[in-house]
Image (cartoon, helix red, strand yellow):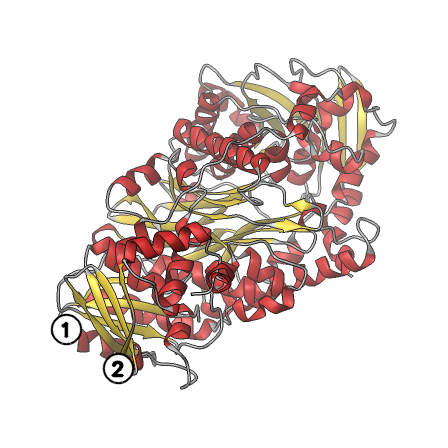
């Protein structure tokens, strides 16, 4: 085989030589294609697998029976929650609508493949600037096109498939120019004794193709996701799949019904690498083989080659192994729902996947060679110079503005911080009628699933700038903020899923950042008792300015013992006092405004480091918030994050007809007025309470946390911030709300 053939598929010379060594012969074109997708970074995790061993659950799975399609959390009462996040970055850069839509479809399939009914979707999105003057006109135009296409794609698929999109986040930064990050998360519910597995078994058991017919779209999509995009993005359009949400809805119902018959031995979706991935991974996981006849595969075009059929990533497809003699039960269920169901092969005891087309063997490979023997690479990471400069940054070089009230209003007018109502209003967030806390009303969404009194708090969060400037601390902060968010609604943080988005791992600086930030995520998850139970890695994300911001996105699950005890993040009619719950910070570098939104957006200075969290105190903080919510002692809770304390206070009054006079707290290490307002301090949570309950609230505060008065509500609709009886800043809430609500809409016009 000519080297340019396998190189075009993403294989290195050394990897091709290893394939020949494993097989004992020269591989066929189809076999090389199968190895190429299974040994791509997207499927094989060749650079990330060594680093992912920081995660205890991942290491446990790799040393045990391997990973399933999604992780599951037992929440009691016989119920389990399945959840996972996946990226669709490269396809969304080329074809934003279908790239985002098929990202949603793929993550939903990962969930119902486990036997869980999908009950919620979330998303975490990153784009380049969308405001005139923030980038060249053509770049801004392209970014707006990407925003519009991605949001419509998520809405177009999610709304039609009948799974509510309940939470998410959107940020903008020049490093995402032309290269968005599109991470989709799905949550499902199931009985813990009805979990489906992907491990094939039972020699002679029939292998059944389920779902839509196979087409020529998405061929080599996994390879495409494992390389940098060039400027000729249009040439990559054939790598992008086309989604059909109505077919997915039929597939959901048929799959869940078929699983209940007991006739299904194992099942997996055909995600990345299509038939190749499902046949190889199911065989390897079950320590068996498969014989597959591609002539029996439903196809959109009759002239499809075996290579195309094995490598296509056409959407809305599954592969199942049925118990021998019961295959017709499975077929009948799927045909009742109008879904293709065809026996295309059977399980063997050879450990090999043997594929035929037109009576000819076109592939004969050992499943474990492709699934378990992908070469892994570790390089010597090097700390980037910008990390050292960030630590040495002198905050005194930044002047304190004369009008800090105007600074707060200016922050409300920043697309990353402003209301995302324009986005989430396009999503159906109440279909299935289980959404108990809606987007915009709290720090996380809350679901009240039928069949249990328990509530589920879900959130996805991440801050790439923190990670770029201080990778280890940034990784920790991603976890503790996501945990804090669900705790602010009353949910006890119990598990996480992660979407890890970076540039090329072959770059020593990016690899070092990846290593350090993942270690930060892992250490924080261990301390917070929120294990990472599933996730995804996306490398080779490069935009106009080089690699994108390194962005680990953390999806967090919190459990409320009673969904009725949920709380939002907005002041209510019964609120008359604001309190601040926090712990002491041993260090506050650069007065808390290093790497902050205030420093970046107001001063145009992207430098400094974020404040490190205290992990055991963060866990204590979450436990206390859960207790306060369960006892009905607080009306609302909102954590201090991007924009600092002043911005967090303002957000709590977005829907209120009143205002507040805030007495800014004394914080060790903070001396500047702008720091008092805009420092991004971990472990600071604002509580809205009824003054009659303050005594009972204080009784619940454990040693290690402090509760201080922050402000008293007033009838005038203004925000007034004081420090030691001196007014530091004042804004009209109507002005803040107007800017906050209209910013993104105006920027997209």
Left or right of 272: which side holds 225? right
Residue 168 % position (x, y): 55, 50
**Residue 492 visible somewhere in the drawing:** no
Q: Position of residue 346 (x, y in %)?
A: 19, 70
Question: Which x, y percent locates residue 341?
Answer: 28, 77
Along the line of sight, which residue is nearer the eye, 533 or 570? 533
Circle 2 packing at 10 Å, graded few (<14), some (14-19), many (20+), is: few
Extreme residue toward the bottom, this view: 302
**Quadrant position of residue 748:** bottom right
Q: CA–CA distance between discs 2 and 1? A: 27 Å
- Along the line of sight, the residue nearer the viewer: 111 or 298: 298
Which residue position is annotated with label 1?
326
Residue under the point 38% across and 57% down: 38
- Residue furthest to the right in view is 402
Helix, strand or loop status at disc 2: loop
In the rendered image, residue 524, in percent from the top left (x then y), is placed at 45, 29
Q: Of the numbered discs in the image, which one, if any, rests on residue 359?
A: 2
Q: Nearer the viewer, residue 164 or 655?
A: 164
- Residue visible at 49% across and 57% down? 10
Tell me the quadrant of the picture where the N terminus can be found: bottom left
């Amino acid at each position: 085989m000519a080297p340019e053939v396998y190189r075009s598929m993403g294989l290195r010379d050394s990897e091709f030589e290893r394939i020949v060594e494993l097989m004992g012969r020269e591989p066929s074109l189809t076999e090389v294609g199968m190895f190429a997708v299974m040994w791509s970074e997207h499927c094989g995790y060749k650079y990330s697998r060594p680093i992912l061993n920081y995660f205890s659950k991942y290491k446990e799975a790799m040393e045990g029976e391997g990973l399933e399609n999604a992780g599951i959390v037992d929440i009691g009462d016989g119920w389990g929650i399945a959840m996972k996040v996946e990226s669709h970055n490269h396809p969304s850069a080329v074809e934003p609508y279908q790239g985002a839509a098929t990202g949603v479809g793929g993550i939903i399939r990962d969930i119902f493949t486990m036997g869980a009914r999908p009950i919620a979707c979330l998303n975490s999105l990153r784009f380049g600037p969308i405001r005139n003057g923030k980038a060249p006109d053509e770049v801004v135009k392209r970014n707006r096109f990407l925003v519009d296409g991605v949001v419509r794609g998520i809405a177009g698929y999610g709304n039609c498939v009948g799974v509510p999109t309940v939470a998410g986040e959107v940020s903008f930064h020049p490093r995402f120019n032309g290269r968005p990050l599109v991470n989709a998360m799905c949550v499902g519910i199931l009985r813990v004794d009805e979990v489906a597995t992907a491990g094939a078994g039972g020699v002679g058991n029939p292998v059944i193709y389920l779902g839509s017919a196979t087409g020529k779209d998405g061929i080599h999509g996994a390879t495409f996701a494992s390389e940098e995009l060039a400027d000729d993005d249009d040439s990559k359009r054939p790598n992008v799949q086309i989604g059909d949400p109505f077919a997915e809805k039929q597939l959901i119902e048929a799959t869940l019904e078929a699983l209940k018959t007991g006739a299904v031995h194992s099942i997996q979706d055909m995600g990345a690498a299509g038939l190749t991935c499902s046949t190889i991974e199911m065989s390897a996981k079950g320590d068996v083989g498969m014989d597959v006849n591609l002539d029996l595969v439903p196809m959109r075009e009759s002239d499809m080659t075996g290579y195309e059929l094995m490598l296509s990533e056409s959407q809305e497809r599954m592969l199942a192994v049925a118990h021998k003699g019961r295959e017709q039960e499975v077929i009948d269920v799927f045909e009742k729902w109008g879904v293709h169901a065809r026996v295309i092969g059977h399980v063997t005891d050879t450990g090999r996947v043997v594929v035929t087309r037109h009576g000819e063997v076109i592939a004969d490979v050992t499943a474990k060679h492709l699934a378990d023997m992908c070469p892994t690479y570790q390089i010597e990471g090097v700390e980037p110079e910008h990390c050292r400069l960030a630590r040495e940054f002198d905050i005194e070089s930044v002047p304190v503005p004369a009008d800090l009230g105007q600074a707060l209003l200016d922050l409300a007018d920043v697309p990353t911080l402003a209301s995302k109502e324009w986005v989430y209003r396009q999503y159906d967030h109440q279909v299935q009628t289980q959404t108990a806390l809606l987007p915009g009303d709290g720090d996380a969404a809350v679901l009240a699933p039928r069949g249990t009194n328990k509530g589920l708090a879900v959130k996805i969060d991440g801050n790439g700038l923190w990670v770029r400037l201080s990778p280890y601390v940034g990784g920790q902060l991603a976890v503790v903020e996501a945990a804090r968010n669900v705790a602010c609604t009353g949910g006890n943080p119990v598990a996480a899923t992660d979407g890890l988005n970076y540039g090329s791992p072959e770059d020593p600086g990016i690899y070092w950042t990846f290593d350090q930030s993942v270690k930060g995520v892992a250490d924080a998850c261990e301390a917070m008792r929120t294990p990472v139970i599933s996730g995804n890695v996306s490398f080779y994300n490069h935009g106009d300015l080089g690699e994108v911001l390194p962005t680990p996105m953390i999806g967090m699950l919190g459990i409320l013992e009673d969904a009725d005890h949920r709380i939002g993040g907005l002041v209510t009619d019964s609120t008359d006092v604001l309190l601040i719950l926090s712990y002491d910070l041993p260090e506050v570098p650069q007065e808390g405004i290093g790497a902050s939104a205030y420093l970046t957006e107001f001063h145009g200075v992207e430098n400094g480091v974020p404040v490190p969290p205290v992990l055991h105190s963060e866990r204590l903080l979450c436990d206390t918030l859960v207790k306060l919510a369960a006892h009905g002692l607080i009306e609302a809770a909102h954590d201090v994050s991007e924009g600092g304390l002043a911005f967090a206070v303002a957000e709590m009054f977005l829907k209120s007809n009143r205002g507040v006079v805030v007495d800014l707290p004394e914080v060790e290490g903070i001396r500047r007025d702008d720091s008092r307002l805009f420092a991004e301090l971990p472990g600071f949570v604002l509580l809205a309470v009824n003054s009659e309950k303050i005594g009972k609230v204080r009784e619940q505060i454990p040693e290690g946390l402090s509760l201080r008065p922050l402000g008293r509500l007033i009838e005038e609709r203004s925000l007034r911030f004081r420090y030691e009886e001196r007014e530091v800043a004042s804004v009209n809430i109507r002005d803040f709300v107007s800017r906050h609500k209209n910013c993104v809409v105006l920027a997209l016009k």
